[in-house]
Each structure stands twice: as structure tokens, then as C-alpha cells.
Image (tube, rainbow, N blue to C red):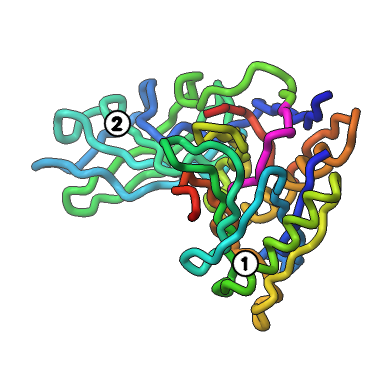
């Protein structure tokens, strides 16, 4: 059963906060990239030397410490199949750790991190 | 064992395709301007039919003051809820410089070619094992479901009737919840629901 992590996501027309989930099976590393958190998967990308990654975009810029916190949660989720823990961006004190509304997740094929 | 989510398909009402209408409009009047090269009218609200929200421009045909039948009508906003056989109308467009105008209400009967292609099944099964997450589409016209697959970036695209910039977040939450439920429910096939007024009419893997 898949290991999931959920993130707070606001419906702007109702001001109700719900969640969007990310399947972190195969995820092994998180880094802060361009103010997002990039989640790397052990899945071959579309070109040589690349792997699949998903950028998680929050309303507030993510930091390296945020990425480290998410990586810890990813590793914990990998040990708990079927889990779905909530991740709230630790450094965000103004937007309740919510995802960006327009592009919360973006998948791409990126160079494998060193 | 695979986990699936069931997606109901509803093709009973669709947005109009955003392109030139394929048939011929009717109406007793003529299409201006009286002289010179015409430009397209401003986008007009379509009336009538079973749908709502569509907009279209009108462009005069080859000759000044030609019959309405010669005009080109281009859908600029597909709206929602239309079906083949609907008779839609465009109100009289007042003269304004070189912009196309009309002297009578334009009527048009929607043809199958004016509607997008819809799925022929009553429902689709979507496997969720390799789903990574949903990808929000801010127009609400569709939503993508991203897949974790090697060598290529793949996704399911659900094309929607009734989605808009006002409810795209709600759509994302509904789709996300259904997939999450399917992932966490062994041996069950939950049915995906959409916000009120929203339905899915086509699913494509790309």
C-alpha cells in the first residue's frame, strides 16, 4: 500500500482548508530548489543521467531546513505503508504551511543530485 | 492486486469547442460593415440551448452587407452543458467602425462537430498504483494526474464540463481525495466524485 504525505491546500472561494497528497513511494531525497522543495524519486528520467522529481510549491518560500524536515517525513512514511501524515511547512508563520494554489506539484526529469 | 478508482463519464452536456462553428448560421439580416475590410466583432454571449456561458465572435464573409449565412462564427469561450441539436442565438451586434455587425439575431444549430470528443464509456477505471499526485489546472477545464513511471513524464488528463477558474481548487481536492481513498483501500474501487455542476467527459493518457 502506498505511502502518502498530505499537505494543506486552501479552497480560496470557501476559505476551507483541505489537503492534497503526494505518493512518496520511491522518494529518497528532498532539497530546497528555487524556493520549492524538490522530492527526488529512484525512477529513471527521460534522458541519461536524469531521474524523476516533483517540485512542491508552497505559498511561502521553502528553506533548506524545510526540505530536511520533509525528507525526514518521507523516510518515516517509507517505513509505514498506507500512512498519510500531514506536512506543514515549518518555516511558514503566515500562510499556515499551505501549498500554492496554482501549481502545488510539478513533475520533471532532472539531473540526479550529487 | 491493483487498486482502481472509478471515474463516471457524463457526456450529456459539453462545452463547445473553441474554434469556428462548422455549420451555417441563419438569420434574416445582413452582416456589416457596409464597406471596407471587416474585423471580428467583440465576443458575444450565446443565448438559448441547454448550456450556458459560451461566447463567440462574428466575422463578416467575403462581401460587405452579405447574408448572415456567410459569416464565420468562432467560439472563444466554450461555456458548459451544450449538446448536439441545441439552437443558440447571438443578439444583434451594433455597428462599430470596421468591426463586424449584424442587423438581425443570428441563430445556429449545434452540430456534433462543434462539440469536443467525449469518451464513449459510462465509466473508466483508472489504476492508482503509480499515481504520484494531482496537477492543478487553473482554468478548471481539466485536471491532470501525474504518474511515477520511468523514462517519460506521463499523466492522465480528465477533461471536465463545468470547471472554471472559480472551482479548480475544489476539483483538485475531490480528485485527490478519490485517488487517496483508492490507494488506501485494498480490494475496493471507490467512485470519484466532482464538485456540484462538474463532470468528466473524457480521459486521456499521454
What is the chain identity of the residue bearing mark 1?
Answer: A
Asked if residue B130 shows in the view, the reply is yes
Residue B198 figure quarter = top right
Q: Which mark is residue B72?
A: 2
Q: Residue furthest front?
A: A114
Q: Which residue is mark 1?
A: A67
* Rendered residue at 73%/20% (across/down): B122
In the displayed structure, B127 sits above or below A72; it is above
Residue at image coords 64%, 16%? B120
What number of labels is visible? 2
In the foreground, A84 or B74: A84
**Helix, strand, or loop for circle 2?**
strand
- Report the residue at 79% width, 41% height from top: A2
Q: CA distance from mark 1 to mark 2?
A: 54 Å
Up the image or down, B77 lies above or below B85; here it is below
What is the magenta range? B126-135
The chief SS type of the magenta part is: strand
Q: Secondary structure at mark 1?
A: helix
**Residue B49 shows in the view:** no
Q: Quadrant of the N terminus of chain B?
A: top right
Q: Residue at (31%, 25%) from the top-left corner?
A: B69
Amino acid at each position: 500500500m502506498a505511502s502518502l504525505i498530505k499537505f494543506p491546500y486552501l479552497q480560496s472561494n470557501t476559505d476551507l482548508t483541505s489537503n492534497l497528497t503526494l505518493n512518496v513511494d520511491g522518494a529518497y531525497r528532498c532539497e530546497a530548489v528555487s524556493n520549492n522543495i524538490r522530492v527526488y524519486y529512484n525512477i529513471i528520467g527521460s534522458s541519461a543521467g536524469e531521474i524523476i522529481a516533483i517540485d512542491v510549491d508552497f505559498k511561502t518560500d521553502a528553506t533548506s531546513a524545510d526540505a530536511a524536515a520533509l525528507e525526514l517525513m518521507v523516510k518515516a512514511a517509507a517505513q509505514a505503508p498506507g500512512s498519510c501524515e500531514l506536512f506543514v511547512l515549518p518555516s511558514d508563520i503566515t500562510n499556515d504551511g499551505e501549498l500554492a494554489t496554482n501549481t502545488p506539484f510539478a513533475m520533471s526529469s532532472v539531473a540526479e543530485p550529487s | 492486486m491493483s487498486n482502481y478508482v472509478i471515474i463516471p463519464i457524463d457526456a450529456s452536456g459539453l462545452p463547445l469547442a473553441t474554434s469556428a462553428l462548422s455549420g451555417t448560421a441563419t438569420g434574416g439580416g445582413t452582416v456589416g460593415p457596409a464597406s471596407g475590410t471587416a474585423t471580428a466583432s467583440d465576443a458575444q454571449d450565446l443565448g438559448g440551448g441547454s448550456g450556458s456561458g459560451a461566447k463567440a465572435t462574428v466575422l463578416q464573409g467575403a462581401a460587405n452587407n452579405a447574408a448572415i449565412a456567410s459569416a464565420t462564427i468562432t467560439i472563444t469561450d466554450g461555456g458548459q452543458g451544450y449538446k448536439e441539436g441545441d439552437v443558440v442565438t447571438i443578439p444583434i451586434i451594433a455597428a462599430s467602425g470596421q468591426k463586424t455587425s449584424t442587423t438581425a439575431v443570428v441563430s445556429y444549430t449545434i452540430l456534433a462537430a462543434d462539440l469536443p470528443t467525449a469518451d464513449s464509456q459510462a465509466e473508466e477505471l483508472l489504476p492508482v498504483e503509480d499515481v504520484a499526485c494531482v496537477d492543478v489546472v487553473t482554468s478548471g477545464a481539466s485536471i491532470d494526474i501525474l504518474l511515477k513511471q520511468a523514462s517519460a513524464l506521463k499523466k492522465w488528463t480528465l477533461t471536465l464540463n463545468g470547471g472554471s477558474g472559480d472551482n479548480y481548487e475544489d476539483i483538485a481536492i475531490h480528485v485527490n481525495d478519490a485517488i487517496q481513498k483508492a490507494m488506501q483501500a485494498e480490494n475496493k474501487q471507490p467512485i470519484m466524485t466532482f464538485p456540484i455542476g462538474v463532470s468528466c467527459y473524457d480521459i486521456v493518457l499521454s
